[in-house]
Image (cartoon, rainbow, N blue to C red):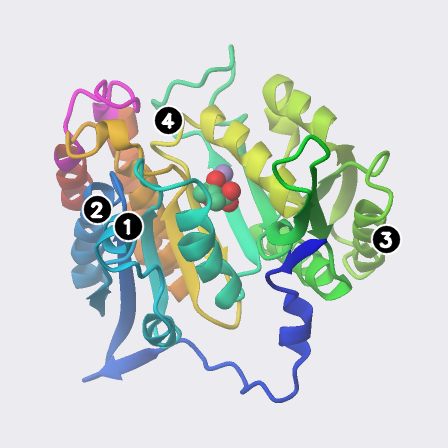
Amino acid sequence: MERTHRRLAVQERNDPHRPPKRQPHTSKVQGQRCYRIAVIPGDGIGPEVIREGLKALEAVSGKNGFRCELIHYDLGGERYLRTKELLPDSVLEELRQCSAIYFGATGHPDLPPTLLEQGLLLRLRFELDQYINLRPVKLYPGVSCPLKDKGPEDIDYVVVRENTEGLYIGAGGFFKKGTPDEVAIQESINTRLGVERCIRYAFEYTRKRNKEKKLLFCGKTNVLNYAHDLWMRVFNEVAREYADVTTEYAHVDAACMWMVKNPERFDVIVTDNMFGDIITDIGAVLQGGLGIAPGGNINPKGVSMFEPMGGSAPKYTGKGVVSPLAAIRACAMMLEHLGETQAARAVEEAVKKATSEKLKSLEAGKMGYSTQEVGDMVAEAV
Ligand code: IPM
Ligand code: MN
């Protein structure tokens, strides 16, 4: 059997010969905080939405007394078509020296699925060990919600998605490929270390968020008798250290139902990589769609990466019709992560102002403004 174990991360992580993690590059220049931000606009609409996010960043940094050194990287489908390079090792090394990465989108209509996803986006997440994918689900005032009778007070929760293991690592293989007897195996890898650090992060996050202090593990323990048995045991064990956090469990299928029926019951959800991918698209649509849904790929001790959740949207590329608010909110998440809390708030407030006072819709072509106009509006408001 031809088997490709792309990455058994735990071996790498436990390798005693590996150099210790460097702290993200942050410096002071003449007493001013200075962050080195790697900007990877990527494919499709990526560059147009990232441009607007950078406008907000520029505006807010001036007002809050810090500076950003931006380093632009041309990576993605176009670069690959030109040079056959996806993520050169030298670039990866430079990224390790940055304070954070601001990422646009990946996906190219002329390239096969999985090439860019595995070669660029997932490779970044894995190589930089960004083991949390943090995805807030928050309905902003003025944004129309597809759920009847639900408003901003009902839709405000956060999904903590495991981001470096599970079905995503590309473990498995084909047997007798292309024949009628073909077998395809895709394995879900769940390590004690990977599961525990994700669950611990979720407990800490729930405590710090300090809203309802309620953490729900979303799994499928009635079927995934190995993977989610481990998750459930670790969840219950770690819970004992957090007496102030109320814990709950839901099967993923039931959780999907509740998200549509009673989204107000959620505070923080922790889940594995694959389920997290799926349920956060429900989360995205509850808060107005991919035009406003951001995500953070977090390595608490390394370099984290912030991105709008949506893809490259080739059919809208270059038209200036898509909402940049997801990219702008990703920028706010990046600021929060860097410790620039005030700046992050200012950006969020500016987004709120845009949704509640100006935008007609978040759908492409229906905002009542162009991508650039929305970016200007937010940058002015901060
Ligand atoms: C996301 C995306 C990615 C994922 C794809 C592009 C590989 O859907 O960030 O949710 O599945 O994680
Ligand atoms: Mn997804």
| Percent of width and height locating residue 122 | 48, 54
Mark yes or no: residue 202 visible.
yes
Q: Circle 3 is placed at which residue position?
A: 233
| Percent of width and height locating residue 135 | 50, 44
| Percent of width and height locating residue 243 | 80, 55
Q: Distance between the residues labelled 2 and 1?
A: 6 Å
Respond yes or no on whether mark 4 lies under 8 Å from ligand 1. Answer: no
Amino acid carrying mark 1 in the image: Gly
Amino acid carrying mark 3 in the image: Arg
Amino acid carrying mark 4 in the image: Pro
The span shown in magenta is 357-372
Q: Is residue 293 above or below residue 95?
A: above
Q: Residues within 10 Å of mark 3 (few under 14, many from 20)?
A: few
Q: Circle 1 is placed at which residue position?
A: 42
Q: Circle 2 is placed at which residue position?
A: 47
Q: How far apart are marks 3 and 4 (CA)?
A: 39 Å
Q: Circle 4 is placed at which residue position?
A: 141
- Contact, mark 2 vs mark 3 (Cβ under 8 Å): no
Q: Is residue 86 above or below residue 47?
A: below
Mark 4 or 2: in front is 2
Amino acid carrying mark 2 in the image: Pro
Query: What SS does tag 2 mark?
Result: helix
Q: How far apart are marks 2 and 3 (CA)?
A: 43 Å
Query: What SS does tag 3 mark?
Result: helix
